[in-house]
Image (spheres, grey):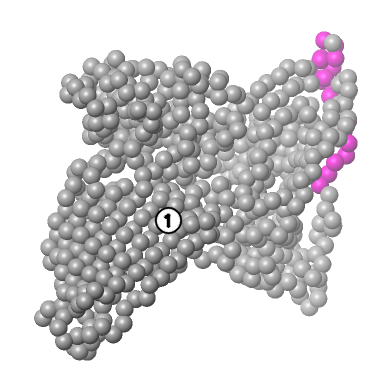
Amino acid sequence: MNKIIILLAFTLTLNTFAQDLKLPFKFGNVPTSEFNLKYYAKDSSANAVVLYEKALAKVILVHDYLRLETTYYHKIKIFNKNSAKYASISIPIYNSLKSQERVIDIKGITHNYNNGIDVKMYLNKKNIFTNKVNDHWKEVTFTLPNIKNGSIIEYSYKLQSPFFYNFTGWDFQGDIPKKYSELHSLIPGNWKYNKKLIGFKKLDVNESKIKYGCFSFTGLERAADCEDLTYVMKDVPAFKKEPYLTAKKNYLSHITFELAEYQSFKGRTSKYTTSWKEVDRNFRNDLAIGRQLKKIDYTKKLLPADLFTEKDTLKRAIKVYHYIQNYFKWNGKYHVTKSVDFKKAFKSKTGNATEINIALCNALNAVGIPTKLMLVSTRKNGLPTYVHPVLNDFNYAIAAAEIGGVFYQLDASYKLMPFAMLPFKALNSYGRLMDFKNGSYWQDIKAPRNVQSTTINLKFSEGVLNGLMRIKSNAFTAYNKRDDLVNKGEEKYKEAFENKSEMNELVIDSYRVRNLENLEKMLVEDFKISFENESDNEDLLIINPYLDKYTTNPFKLNERTYPIDFGYTQSENYHFVFSVPEGYEISSVPKNKILTLENNTASLNGKTTINGRQIIIDYKLSSSNKCNS
């Protein structure tokens, strides 16, 4: 056996089935039908379309070393100059101290159709560049030449990598539509990957089979079997971003490969995916997390005595929360597993979000309220992997306090955030509650219902509409208003309010705000307002009764394939009363209307009542945190 190992080290010769990227056409040949394509019928607004793309991933031997080689091919139709950017290619490559990835066999052609002739211009090797990005990353760049309206570009290259964990998968969906997208992988069973299909489009081809004896080399007792995978999507629509979406990668149709385990040809097994039980054990003893959460006695000595005397548990928790919130200044950073020093943060009264929320966990535990750290991923960072631990998925940490069998999720890094409310960026479906004693587990992220109630009483006198308005708000609406009032000032706040109002030339004659600093109560604003008649005719009163007006629909797609995520449920109540002056009669009022989306995810109920000389208008707008319509 020892002789075989020595022989392998010096005389490895690869014996494997010839397996190259196979295309249904010859590279460099473009049919006339593709030149005649003036637009993409399934999306006439598209500036370009991927006609065909394919990748093949396989294991090869390079200078006696195993490498993961992925061959890529792309063919794209350019409809206009707005899509010329798709002719500029950037390929990231990773390097460590010992080895690095490399890109080889780059080929590229630009096809332009001229009087029935395919005029080809080839990519010049001199126009391929390698640039340093940082100590670990470089990029290989090139641009296909002579791009015009109607050009077709095709290019291919091979990426050879010693880092088998860098096989990240394949994006079926992108910023432009694709007619055909395929990933084919042929990898020996020594490499075991966790595979996950993400997105809202189904695969047209999903084939998995075993290819027996597909990989061998001199000295290996028997050939290894390969997992032969083929994934295809056809007619993939372009991803078009809209408001109220979380991270783009949550919606793009793509497949991910995460290396779980590797068994060498010598029989040694290396595991790359761990269990949550192992993660819990490591975190419990980790300097940045576990040991920081054990400094309860240290924290207890630093807390004011009055935090221990409140008998009501919930009130005690709220007092501790606001103490930590006011004690620390957030430095604008958030880390989970690095740059976390609880003691240093306590002494300087400044820290990142994890340090502040670890301090909150310790403080709540110090006053007898069981509290644990919860790992979350922000909305822009994407959803964390649910099946197995991927710690890089988490980039934020909050506290979760258990009171009377109910968990209250807390973040003390924001000065104006009330108890049991998380910042909007943290409202991303679920997180991992780190229970080191009983084992961590997933917990849904909660958000309070966002409510705003507006009451307006108006009359008409001396040619001016005037009256009183009261707005009561909580949760995110109140938070945003408090933020503006505290950081911008009352005068700028009123000016912005007047400018955005739909009421004609609205003027705030007086303004009073209550509960600005009492974050646990609704923010109450009282206005004296006046505004002008919208008619130039003195005998005609035209009144816009709505303070805010939805003039455009923010959702532009004809067909939605992914849900909208508002983050929290909302309810807006509006009550308008106008006293009709003597000498006027009512000509027209808004009609009653009820609008409801499918599955009751959102509704609008508008009602107008005439009561003697009063016109009363009520509407209620409500929506759930997610909407599929």
Give the magenta range: 2-21
User: In the drawing, does residue 190 fall left or right of residue 496?
Assistant: right
In the displayed structure, would residue 510 be above or below residue 276?
below
At a point 27% along the width and 75% down the height, the residue shown is 610
User: Residue 215: image x %, image y %?
Assistant: 85, 30
Of the 4 image quadrants, the one containing the N terminus is top right
User: Residue 612: image x %, image y %?
Assistant: 21, 76
Residue pointed to by mark 1: 623
At a point 47% along the width and 37% down the height, the residue shown is 444
Q: Nearer the viewer, residue 79 or 499?
A: 499
At a point 31% along the width and 60% down the height, the residue shown is 573
Please state which amino acid type lies under the numbered disc 1: Ser
Whether residue 342 appears in this view of the structure is no
User: Residue 529: image x %, image y %?
Assistant: 17, 68
Q: Nearer the viewer, residue 313 or 508?
A: 313
Q: Nearer the viewer, residue 194 or 270?
A: 194
User: In the drawing, does residue 629 fall left or right of residue 418?
Assistant: right
Q: Is residue 9 magenta?
A: yes
In the displayed structure, would residue 442 be above or below residue 180?
above
